[in-house]
Amino acid sequence: MKMMTTLTLLLMTWCAHATSLKDYKPFNYEVLFTNPECKLYSYDQPQINSNGEEVKSKTKNAYCKSSDSSRSQNRTDSPHSRFIDWISDTKTKSIFMAYLSFSKHSVAEELCRAVKRGVKLTMIIDSNNDGDINRMRELDYISKCAQDSSNVRLELRGGEGRGSNKLGYAHNKIFLINHDLKGETKIAFSSGNLSSGLATHHENWHFVTTHTSSYFAQAHLCLMTGMLDHHEGKKEYAQFVKSCKSKINVPEEDDMKTFFVPGEGPKALAIMKKSFGESDLVQVAAHRFSLNVLEQLIKESLIQKKTVQLVADDDLHYSAVYKKGVGRNMTNEAYKVKNLEAKGLQAHFIETWMDNLEAPQSLQLHHNKFLIFNKRNHPFAVFAGAGNLTNAAFQTNFENFYFTTIDSVVEKFAEQYKYLFSKLGKSSSELPSELVLP
C-alpha cells in the first residue's frame, strides 16, 4: 500500500511538470492517412491537357469510386480498422464522439456490439442531418440497438443562437475513449467524418493514447461538456471552454496545442501567422479555400520569395475553368487560388470521382486540411484538425484544431505531402482541359 501511494505521488508530481505530451505515460501517437488503393480508371478516348499532351486515365489511387471502398478500409493499417480495434477492445468502457456526419455502417455495427456489452456511448452529429432518412440511418440503427438504454445518449448540435451569436455547423471530428476514468485514455481526431472518409476520401487521422491527467486530455473534456451542456450560442460555448481550460491544473503541453472554436479561432490564426513568419516553405493541403487570413499570409510569403505549395481537389481547379461551382468547391475560392498561382503559388490538384457532373449525389473528396511549416529543408510544425480553411471554421462552427511540433508526427506529414503533391497531384497544365468521367 505504501509503495502504491509513493508511485501515485511520483506520477502526480511527474505529470504536473510535463511540458511534452510524450512525458505522460502511457503515450502513443499514431498518424494514419486514408490513402485509398483503387483501380486504374481509363478514358474511353484520350483527353488533352493544356500542354497539348494526351491523358489516357485518371491518376491511380487518387481517383477512386465507391466500389474501391472495401479494399481500402479493410487493410490492417487503415483508419477504419483502427476505429474497429479501439471500439472492440474489452478495455473500452465509455465513448464520446462528435462528427458532422456519420454514415459508416460497419462502425455503427461495432458500436452496437459495444453498447450491448455495457459500453457507455455519447454521440453528437450536426443538426442538419435531422429529417434526412439516409443521413440519420446509422443513428437510428444505434438507437434501436440501444433499446432505450440509459448508457446511450444521442444529440444533434449546430445552428443554435441568433444573429451574431448563432452557431454554424457542428463540424468537430473527435472520438474519446475512457475519458471519464482515471488512467489511460484514447483520443482520435481527424479531417474526416465517419463516412467515406474512412475509405476513399483523402484524409488524415490521429490516434493518441495518453493519461487522463494530461492537459491535452482534460482540454477535450472541456470540448465535450461544452457541446453537451453549453451550446445555446457562440458566446456561451466560448466562455465555458475558456473558463474550463483555465481550471486545468497542469500546464499545456509545449508540443501539442489545442484550439476549439467558437472562441479560440484568433489564437489558432495567431500561431499560424507566427509559423508563416518562421518558415521559408509552407505546404498547404485544403478541401475548401476561402480563409482571408491564410490568403493574405500566402501573398506576403510569395512577395518575400518564400515557397508556398498547395494540394487541393481538382474540383477547385475546374470551378475556375467552368466559372461555376464543381463538386463541393465554389468559384470564389477557385479564383483566390488562381490569383495566388499567378503570384507564384505552386498548386497541384488531386483528381477525384463523382457520380454526376451536374448534380452529384455521391462523390469522392480531397478532404485534407493541414499546413506543414518548414525552415531550411526541415519541417518543424503541423497545423491540422477538423475545420476547413474557411472563415466560418475559425469563427462560427464547432471545430477542433491542433498545432504540434512532435517530430514523429511532423515527419509523417512531410512524407505524406510528398506523396500527395508529387505522386497523386497534377498541376493545372497537366490536368485534362475538360472534366470528363471515365
Image: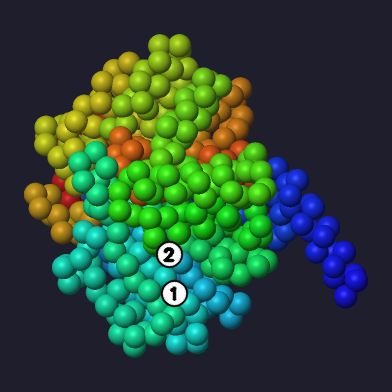
State the SS at label 1. Answer: strand
Q: Which mark is residue 121?
A: 1
Above or below for 438 versus 337: below
Name the residue rendered at 40%, 15% in the picture: 300
Q: Quadrant of residue 197?
A: bottom left
Name the quarter where the N terminus is drawn.
bottom right
**Residue at the far left in the pictured view:** 358
**Residue at the far top in the pictured view:** 304
Could you tell me how far apart the alpha carbons at marks 2 and 1 are, in whole angstroms?
8 Å
Name the residue rendered at 85%, 70% in the picture: 4
- Say if mark 2 contacts mark 1, CB within 8 Å: yes
Amino acid under disc 1: Leu
Residue 285 visible in the picture? no
Q: Reading the chain from its start, which is encountered first: label 2 or label 1?
A: 2
Question: Which residue is identified by label 2?
Answer: 97
Above or below for 42 versus 118: above
Percent of width and height locating residue 337: 28, 27
Which one is nearer the viewer's eye here, 348 or 108?
Answer: 108
Name the residue rendered at 41%, 37% in the picture: 265
